[in-house]
């Protein structure tokens, strides 16, 4: 454990700086200063079902609600958040931003009632190169803040497979896992099949792309915990 003296010496030699504005952080601040956190250009789309993000899905897939945490604009100091998260190895930034997003989502009846938070998997090669999936870190922050279960979709660790039906009726399987400590003890042995009685699954994206992968909660047929 860091002693106060050790903490202050470290702060003196290697001051922690806000990722957004570059100012020195105070002891209670993590990665982003309170001033920058307060001024994040939040979209507040979670208050409006007919928001621009939801409109992107119209005619493509049936969704209940969609939102985005903050507006990304080129040249904005907040551009550094995404850049550092994706390209500078600052994965903890995702969790910090996710926690802030979770505070907003808890205010929404639609999002506060979801059962699972599910980050979209990265291509295994991309994840290997980057060393982490930034969506996982964002989702982890949201799940912690909202006290929700995290369903982690992984393509290289076949601990859970989720069967679901596509819009045109094809059956697809997505390999997933949950945090080990969230898997009920009885499911740790052998293969266990758990019927999902219609839980809401909130899919999390770090960026809106055309070829996203996800499944709707009402398309899930079952999932198998494979050990
Ligand atoms: Zn700042």
Image (tube, rainbow, N blue to C red):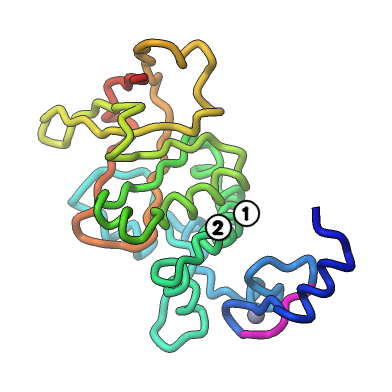
Image x and y of residue 28, in percent: 78, 65
- The one nearer the camera, 20 or 47, is 20
Q: At 32% from the left edge and 22% from the top edge, which residue is drawn?
A: 223
**Cα–Cα span, label 1 and label 2:** 5 Å
* Residue 117 vertical placement versus 122 (above, below): above
Element type at marker 1? helix
Q: At 89% from the left edge and 68% from the top edge, which residue is drawn?
A: 5
Image x and y of residue 107, in percent: 61, 50
Q: Which residues are magenta?
A: 22-26
Element type at marker 2? helix
Image x and y of residue 119, in percent: 40, 46
Left or right of 54, for residue 36: right
Q: Which residue is mark 2?
A: 101
Q: Which residue is mark 1?
A: 103
* Residue 180 vertical placement versus 79 (above, below): above
Left or right of 104, for residue 179: left
Quadrant of the image occupied by residue 181? top right
């Amino acid at each position: 454990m860091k002693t106060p003296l050790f903490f202050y010496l470290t702060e003196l030699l290697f001051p922690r700086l806000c990722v957004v504005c570059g100012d020195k952080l105070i002891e209670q601040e993590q990665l982003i200063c309170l001033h920058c956190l307060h001024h994040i250009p939040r979209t507040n789309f979670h208050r409006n079902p007919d928001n621009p993000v939801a409109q992107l899905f119209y005619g493509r897939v049936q969704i209940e609600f969609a939102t985005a945490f903050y507006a990304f604009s080129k040249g904005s100091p907040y551009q550094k958040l995404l850049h550092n998260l994706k390209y500078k190895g600052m994965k903890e930034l995702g969790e910090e931003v996710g926690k802030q997003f979770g505070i907003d989502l808890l205010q929404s009846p639609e999002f506060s009632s979801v059962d699972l938070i599910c980050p979209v998997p990265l291509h295994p090669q991309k994840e290997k190169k980057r060393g982490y999936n930034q969506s996982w870190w964002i989702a982890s922050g949201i799940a912690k803040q909202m006290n929700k279960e995290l369903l982690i979709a992984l393509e290289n660790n076949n601990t859970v497979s989720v069967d679901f039906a596509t819009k045109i009726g094809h059956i697809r399987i997505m390999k997933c896992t949950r945090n080990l400590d969230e898997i009920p003890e009885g499911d740790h042995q052998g293969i266990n099949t758990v019927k999902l009685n219609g839980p809401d699954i909130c899919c999390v994206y770090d960026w809106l792309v055309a070829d996203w992968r996800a499944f709707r909660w009402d398309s899930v047929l079952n999932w198998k915990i494979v050990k």
